Image (cartoon, rainbow, N blue to C red):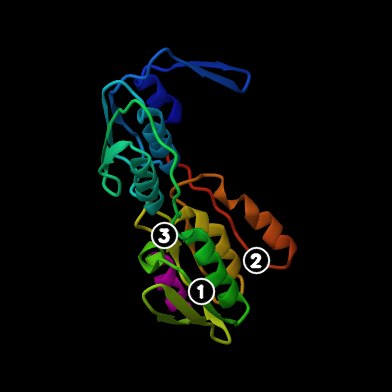
Amino acid sequence: MHLKAFEKLGINIEQNYGKIACSCDKILGEKIDLDFPSVGATENAILASCLEDGKTIITNAAREPEIIDLQNFLNKMGARIKGAGTNKIEIEGVKTLKDVSYNIMPDRIESGTFLCIAAATNGNVKLKNVDVEHITPIIHKLEETGCTLNIQKREIEIQAPKRLKAVDIKTMPYPGFPTDMQSIFATTLTMAKGTSVIVENIFENRYKYTRRINKNGSENRYRRKNSNN
Protein backbone atom coordinates (compact mmCIF):
# COMPACT_ATOMS: atom_id res chain seq x y z
CA MET A 1 0.00 0.00 0.00
CA HIS A 2 2.88 2.35 0.77
CA LEU A 3 4.54 1.77 -2.60
CA LYS A 4 1.27 1.92 -4.54
CA ALA A 5 0.58 5.32 -2.98
CA PHE A 6 4.06 6.54 -3.95
CA GLU A 7 3.59 5.33 -7.52
CA LYS A 8 0.30 7.22 -7.72
CA LEU A 9 2.23 10.39 -6.86
CA GLY A 10 4.61 9.84 -9.78
CA ILE A 11 7.44 8.26 -7.82
CA ASN A 12 9.44 5.55 -9.59
CA ILE A 13 9.88 2.41 -7.49
CA GLU A 14 12.66 -0.12 -8.02
CA GLN A 15 12.78 -3.30 -5.93
CA ASN A 16 15.80 -5.56 -5.98
CA TYR A 17 16.39 -8.36 -3.45
CA GLY A 18 14.75 -6.53 -0.55
CA LYS A 19 16.18 -3.14 -1.49
CA ILE A 20 13.70 -0.43 -2.45
CA ALA A 21 14.80 2.67 -4.36
CA CYS A 22 12.40 5.60 -4.87
CA SER A 23 13.09 8.48 -7.25
CA CYS A 24 11.25 11.23 -9.13
CA ASP A 25 11.79 14.68 -10.60
CA LYS A 26 8.54 16.04 -9.22
CA ILE A 27 5.72 14.72 -7.03
CA LEU A 28 2.33 15.29 -8.63
CA GLY A 29 -0.99 15.56 -6.83
CA GLU A 30 -3.28 12.58 -7.35
CA LYS A 31 -6.18 10.65 -5.81
CA ILE A 32 -5.03 7.73 -3.67
CA ASP A 33 -7.55 5.03 -2.72
CA LEU A 34 -6.09 2.86 0.04
CA ASP A 35 -7.15 -0.80 0.05
CA PHE A 36 -7.04 -0.74 3.86
CA PRO A 37 -6.94 2.20 6.31
CA SER A 38 -3.24 1.70 7.10
CA VAL A 39 -1.74 4.20 9.52
CA GLY A 40 1.75 4.01 8.00
CA ALA A 41 0.55 4.22 4.40
CA THR A 42 -1.67 7.19 5.24
CA GLU A 43 1.20 8.99 6.99
CA ASN A 44 3.65 8.28 4.16
CA ALA A 45 1.19 9.53 1.55
CA ILE A 46 0.67 12.73 3.55
CA LEU A 47 4.41 13.31 4.01
CA ALA A 48 5.16 12.68 0.34
CA SER A 49 2.40 15.08 -0.75
CA CYS A 50 3.27 18.11 1.38
CA LEU A 51 5.65 19.63 -1.18
CA GLU A 52 3.91 18.30 -4.27
CA ASP A 53 2.79 20.15 -7.34
CA GLY A 54 -1.02 20.13 -7.11
CA LYS A 55 -3.52 18.48 -4.77
CA THR A 56 -3.73 14.95 -3.37
CA ILE A 57 -6.85 13.29 -1.97
CA ILE A 58 -6.49 10.16 0.16
CA THR A 59 -9.63 8.04 0.56
CA ASN A 60 -10.14 5.20 3.03
CA ALA A 61 -7.50 6.95 5.12
CA ALA A 62 -6.64 5.81 8.63
CA ARG A 63 -8.38 7.83 11.35
CA GLU A 64 -5.99 7.24 14.26
CA PRO A 65 -5.13 10.17 16.57
CA GLU A 66 -1.55 10.00 15.29
CA ILE A 67 -2.83 11.07 11.85
CA ILE A 68 -4.46 14.13 13.37
CA ASP A 69 -1.30 14.95 15.29
CA LEU A 70 0.80 14.63 12.13
CA GLN A 71 -1.58 16.97 10.28
CA ASN A 72 -1.42 19.55 13.08
CA PHE A 73 2.37 19.36 13.16
CA LEU A 74 2.80 19.72 9.40
CA ASN A 75 0.22 22.52 9.16
CA LYS A 76 2.14 24.42 11.82
CA MET A 77 5.16 24.07 9.53
CA GLY A 78 3.19 25.62 6.68
CA ALA A 79 1.59 22.61 5.02
CA ARG A 80 -2.03 22.73 3.84
CA ILE A 81 -3.73 19.54 5.00
CA LYS A 82 -7.32 18.94 6.09
CA GLY A 83 -9.54 16.00 6.89
CA ALA A 84 -7.33 14.07 9.32
CA GLY A 85 -9.51 12.01 11.65
CA THR A 86 -11.88 11.20 8.79
CA ASN A 87 -11.56 8.69 5.95
CA LYS A 88 -10.82 11.46 3.43
CA ILE A 89 -7.73 13.67 3.63
CA GLU A 90 -6.83 16.49 1.24
CA ILE A 91 -3.33 17.90 0.80
CA GLU A 92 -2.54 21.08 -1.15
CA GLY A 93 1.13 21.18 -2.06
CA VAL A 94 3.27 24.06 -0.80
CA LYS A 95 6.76 25.14 -1.84
CA THR A 96 8.50 25.08 1.53
CA LEU A 97 8.04 24.10 5.17
CA LYS A 98 9.42 26.06 8.12
CA ASP A 99 11.06 25.03 11.39
CA VAL A 100 8.69 24.90 14.37
CA SER A 101 8.50 23.76 17.98
CA TYR A 102 5.73 21.24 18.62
CA ASN A 103 4.52 19.13 21.54
CA ILE A 104 3.45 15.69 20.35
CA MET A 105 0.37 13.92 21.71
CA PRO A 106 0.55 11.49 24.66
CA ASP A 107 1.35 7.99 23.41
CA ARG A 108 -1.83 5.94 23.74
CA ILE A 109 -0.02 2.60 23.52
CA GLU A 110 2.32 3.57 26.34
CA SER A 111 -0.68 4.69 28.39
CA GLY A 112 -2.43 1.38 27.76
CA THR A 113 0.75 -0.53 28.60
CA PHE A 114 1.14 1.08 32.02
CA LEU A 115 -2.53 0.40 32.78
CA CYS A 116 -2.08 -3.26 31.81
CA ILE A 117 1.03 -3.54 33.99
CA ALA A 118 -1.04 -2.37 36.95
CA ALA A 119 -3.84 -4.80 36.08
CA ALA A 120 -1.49 -7.79 35.77
CA THR A 121 0.26 -7.09 39.09
CA ASN A 122 -2.78 -6.24 41.24
CA GLY A 123 -1.46 -2.70 41.25
CA ASN A 124 -2.73 0.81 41.86
CA VAL A 125 -1.35 3.36 39.38
CA LYS A 126 -2.21 6.94 38.43
CA LEU A 127 -1.29 8.17 34.95
CA LYS A 128 -1.07 11.89 34.19
CA ASN A 129 -1.11 13.69 30.84
CA VAL A 130 -3.30 11.03 29.24
CA ASP A 131 -5.82 11.60 26.44
CA VAL A 132 -8.70 9.43 27.66
CA GLU A 133 -10.59 9.53 24.35
CA HIS A 134 -7.66 7.87 22.58
CA ILE A 135 -7.73 4.76 24.78
CA THR A 136 -11.47 4.26 25.31
CA PRO A 137 -11.50 0.62 24.00
CA ILE A 138 -8.61 -0.26 26.33
CA ILE A 139 -10.40 1.31 29.29
CA HIS A 140 -13.59 -0.61 28.55
CA LYS A 141 -11.75 -3.95 28.39
CA LEU A 142 -9.89 -3.25 31.63
CA GLU A 143 -13.21 -2.51 33.31
CA GLU A 144 -14.53 -5.84 32.01
CA THR A 145 -11.63 -7.61 33.71
CA GLY A 146 -12.80 -6.15 37.02
CA CYS A 147 -10.43 -3.20 37.29
CA THR A 148 -11.72 0.03 38.82
CA LEU A 149 -10.77 3.15 36.88
CA ASN A 150 -11.14 6.69 38.17
CA ILE A 151 -11.07 8.90 35.07
CA GLN A 152 -10.44 12.63 35.14
CA LYS A 153 -9.92 15.01 32.22
CA ARG A 154 -6.19 14.32 31.72
CA GLU A 155 -5.47 11.50 34.15
CA ILE A 156 -6.53 7.95 34.98
CA GLU A 157 -6.14 5.98 38.18
CA ILE A 158 -6.50 2.20 38.02
CA GLN A 159 -7.03 -0.22 40.89
CA ALA A 160 -6.72 -3.86 39.95
CA PRO A 161 -8.77 -6.61 41.63
CA LYS A 162 -7.21 -9.61 43.37
CA ARG A 163 -7.98 -11.73 40.29
CA LEU A 164 -8.78 -10.50 36.79
CA LYS A 165 -11.75 -11.83 34.82
CA ALA A 166 -11.38 -13.30 31.34
CA VAL A 167 -12.53 -11.11 28.43
CA ASP A 168 -12.78 -11.40 24.64
CA ILE A 169 -11.02 -8.95 22.32
CA LYS A 170 -11.17 -8.18 18.60
CA THR A 171 -8.61 -5.79 17.12
CA MET A 172 -9.92 -3.22 14.66
CA PRO A 173 -8.80 0.02 13.00
CA TYR A 174 -9.36 3.11 15.13
CA PRO A 175 -11.63 3.72 17.01
CA GLY A 176 -11.65 -0.04 17.68
CA PHE A 177 -9.28 -1.94 19.95
CA PRO A 178 -5.71 -1.19 18.75
CA THR A 179 -3.67 -4.06 17.35
CA ASP A 180 -0.53 -2.66 19.01
CA MET A 181 -2.15 -3.33 22.41
CA GLN A 182 -3.10 -6.91 21.56
CA SER A 183 0.04 -8.62 22.81
CA ILE A 184 0.21 -6.38 25.88
CA PHE A 185 -3.37 -7.15 26.86
CA ALA A 186 -3.00 -10.85 26.08
CA THR A 187 -0.03 -11.04 28.46
CA THR A 188 -2.16 -9.37 31.12
CA LEU A 189 -4.95 -11.89 30.54
CA THR A 190 -2.61 -14.78 31.39
CA MET A 191 -3.29 -13.69 34.98
CA ALA A 192 -7.09 -13.80 34.52
CA LYS A 193 -9.47 -16.50 35.71
CA GLY A 194 -11.12 -18.31 32.81
CA THR A 195 -10.54 -18.41 29.07
CA SER A 196 -10.09 -15.25 27.02
CA VAL A 197 -10.47 -15.21 23.24
CA ILE A 198 -8.50 -12.72 21.12
CA VAL A 199 -9.19 -12.19 17.41
CA GLU A 200 -6.54 -10.33 15.40
CA ASN A 201 -7.93 -8.53 12.34
CA ILE A 202 -4.97 -6.34 11.37
CA PHE A 203 -1.62 -8.22 11.36
CA GLU A 204 -1.58 -11.93 10.56
CA ASN A 205 1.72 -12.58 12.37
CA ARG A 206 0.81 -10.77 15.58
CA TYR A 207 0.51 -14.00 17.59
CA LYS A 208 4.17 -15.02 17.38
CA TYR A 209 4.83 -13.70 20.89
CA THR A 210 2.62 -16.43 22.41
CA ARG A 211 5.47 -18.96 22.11
CA ARG A 212 7.55 -16.86 24.46
CA ILE A 213 4.70 -16.52 26.95
CA ASN A 214 4.15 -20.27 26.92
CA LYS A 215 7.76 -20.75 28.03
CA ASN A 216 6.87 -18.84 31.20
CA GLY A 217 4.16 -21.35 32.06
CA SER A 218 1.09 -19.73 30.50
CA GLU A 219 -1.35 -21.73 28.43
CA ASN A 220 -2.01 -20.15 25.04
CA ARG A 221 -3.63 -21.81 22.07
CA TYR A 222 -3.13 -20.08 18.74
CA ARG A 223 -5.41 -21.09 15.91
CA ARG A 224 -4.95 -19.46 12.54
CA LYS A 225 -8.10 -19.36 10.44
CA ASN A 226 -7.69 -19.75 6.72
CA SER A 227 -9.74 -17.17 4.82
CA ASN A 228 -10.98 -19.93 2.50
CA ASN A 229 -12.54 -21.91 5.39
Q: Nearer the viewer, mark 1 or mark 2?
A: 1
Which of the marked residues, 3 or 2, is nearer the chain's N terminus? 3
Q: Is disc 1 placed on a helix, strand or loop?
A: strand
Q: Position of residue 20 (x, y in %)?
A: 56, 21
Disc 1 crowd, CA 10 A, few/some/many (<14, 14-19, 20+): some
Q: Which residue is mark 2?
A: 219
Q: Which residue is mark 3?
A: 177
Q: Nearer the viewer, mark 3 or mark 2?
A: 3
138 part of magenta stretch: yes
Judged by its main secondary structure, the magenta piece is helix
Chain part drawn in magenta: 137-146
Q: Position of residue 57 (x, y in %)?
A: 26, 31
- Of the 4 image quadrants, the one containing the N terminus is top left
Q: Which residue is mark 1?
A: 127
Q: Left or right? Give the position of 70 relative to 209.
A: left
Question: What amino acid does circle 2 point to?
Answer: Glu
Give residue 33's mark: none
